[in-house]
Amino acid sequence: MVKAHVTVHLKPGISDPEGNNTLKALQLLGFDGVVAAHTTRVWTIELATKSKDKAKEQVDAMCRRLLTNPVIHDYTIKVE
């Protein structure tokens, strides 16, 4: 079995309302040193294969077909 970790974040220039609201809340709570907050999604996917290359290929297809929107998201895949 192989584990893959997929990290998805918004591309530069794409509005991040949740991150912006978090930044405002942190500053209102007195965390003045915080200058940015961004949302990121992480998935851990377990695959029934022993091949890291095959796992990465499959997870990349999952990202392109379901987990991301290529217009607004970038993603990285790390396979254990």
Image: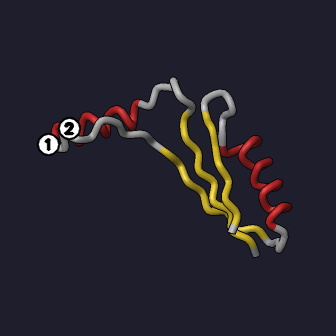
Q: Residues within 10 Å of mark 2 (few under 14, many from 20)?
A: some
Q: Tell me whether the residue at label 2 lies in contact with that at label 1, contact meaning CB atoms closer than 8 angstroms.
A: yes
Q: Nearer the viewer, residue 59 or 77?
A: 77
Give left or right: position of 4 versus 36: right
- 42, above or below 15, in the image: below
- Give the number of the disc on residue 76: none
Label of residue 27 in the image = 2
x, y percent for residue 50: 82, 74
The furthest residue to the front: 33
Image x and y of residue 26, in percent? 23, 42
Secondary structure at badge 1 equals loop
Marks 2/1: CA–CA distance: 5 Å
The residue lying furthest to the left in this view is 30
Dot 2 amino acid type = Gln
- Residue that numbered label 1 is attached to: 30
Q: How many discs appear?
A: 2
Q: Residue at x 84, y 69 (%)?
A: 51
Q: Secondary structure at mark 2?
A: helix
Residue 46: image location, x then y, percent: 70, 68
Relative side of 23 to 45, left or right: left
**Image quarter in which the N terminus is found:** bottom right
